Image (cartoon, rainbow, N blue to C red):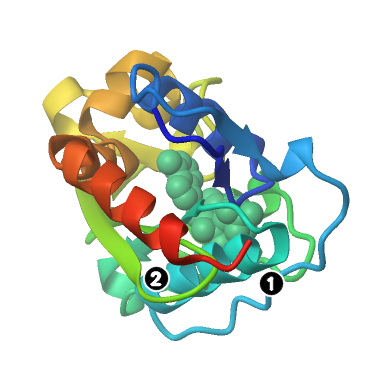
């Protein structure tokens, strides 16, 4: 057991829900930014998911003095040259809702037959000082013609996953976590979790608290 909590560096309720389910059994006290007072937002100005995940994890670990896990993720659409990509959360503008983003995406794909898309996720685990550990996951699918399903968050209602013949918003949390980009990245992390714990303990022992 780690003698400090691992902080999920996110305020996205959908992500927090999924991570809590995925990290059950890790033997770590999981907290999120909701458990702490306000800290300034991180500017997500990286060009890649990895840049942003690293930035969020590091910034949070430094601000709170605890190890932090950040996720930067998004949807890349083939015929849109990979957009919205790192801009997924604000595709329809700053403060856009999930509904706004989904409507903009469906309009951008109006009349297009190539509807291939992929969710991508990069998870970074950082301590206040030093390097971070990086895990990646990807899930391929297609963009629907209209929103379907009530579960999940973000682009889930427009992301059709052929192997299960449903959109992500039509899957249960458990079904989605088994196949999703975030689930894949977490599976990779879980596989080497023993090593991660050793890494974290060694890094934290070096921290000047
Ligand atoms: P944090 O930075 O606080 O973690 P965020 O919502 O801003 O929250 P990102 O910058 O990583 O997160 O943006 C990811 C966006 O990509 C997210 O807002 C969704 O619109 C979309 N997204 C990521 N994972 C998704 C998933 O599993 N299902 C549906 N949409 C997802």
Does dot 2 land on a helix, a strand or a loop?
Answer: helix
Determine crowd level at label 2: few under 14, some 14-19, many 20+ residues with C-alpha closer than 10 A: many
Q: Nearer the viewer, residue 87 or 147?
A: 87
Answer whether residue 179 is visible to the viewer in this image: yes
* Vertical comparison of 33 with 93: above or below: above
Q: Which residue is labeled 1 in the image? A: 42
**Screen quadrant of the N terminus:** top left
Q: Position of residue 44 (x, y in %)?
A: 60, 76
Closer-to-camera residue (93/123): 123
The answer to whether the residue bearing label 2 lies less than 8 angstroms from the nearest atom of ligand 1 is yes
Give the x, y percent position of residue 19. 46, 32
Q: Earlier in the sequence, mark 1 or mark 2?
A: 1
Q: Quadrant of residue 56?
A: bottom right
Q: Could you tell me residue 206's position as x and y percent? A: 44, 66
Label 1 SS? loop
Query: Which residue shows up at 27% across the image and 55% down it?
Result: 118
Q: Say whether mark 1 is within 8 Å of ligand 1.
A: yes
Picture quarter containing residue 115?
bottom left
1 or 2: mark nearer the eye: 1
**Residue in the foreground of this view, choosing between 134 and 28:** 28
Mark 1, Cα crowd under 10 Å, few <14 / some 14-19 / many 20+, is: some
Would you name the residue on which mark 2 appears?
Answer: 49
């Amino acid at each position: 057991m780690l003698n400090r909590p691992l902080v999920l560096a996110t305020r996205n309720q959908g992500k927090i829900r999924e991570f809590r389910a995925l990290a059950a059994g890790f033997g770590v006290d999981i907290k999120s930014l909701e458990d702490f007072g306000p800290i300034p937002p991180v500017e997500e100005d990286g060009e890649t998911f990895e840049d942003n995940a690293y930035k969020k994890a590091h910034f949070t670990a430094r601000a709170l003095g605890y190890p932090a896990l950040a996720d930067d993720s998004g949807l890349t659409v083939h015929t849109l040259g990979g957009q919205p990509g790192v801009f997924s959360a604000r595709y329809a503008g700053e403060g856009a809702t999930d509904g706004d983003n989904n409507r903009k995406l469906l309009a951008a794909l109006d009349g297009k037959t190539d509807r291939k898309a992929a969710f991508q996720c990069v998870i970074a685990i950082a301590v206040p000082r030093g390097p971070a550990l990086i895990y990646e996951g990807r899930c391929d699918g297609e963009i629907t013609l209209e929103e379907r399903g009530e579960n999940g968050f973000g682009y889930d209602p427009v992301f059709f996953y052929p192997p299960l013949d449903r959109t992500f918003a039509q899957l249960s949390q458990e079904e989605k976590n088994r196949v999703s980009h975030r689930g894949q990245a977490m599976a990779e992390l879980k596989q080497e979790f023993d090593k991660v714990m050793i890494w974290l303990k060694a890094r934290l022992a070096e921290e000047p608290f």
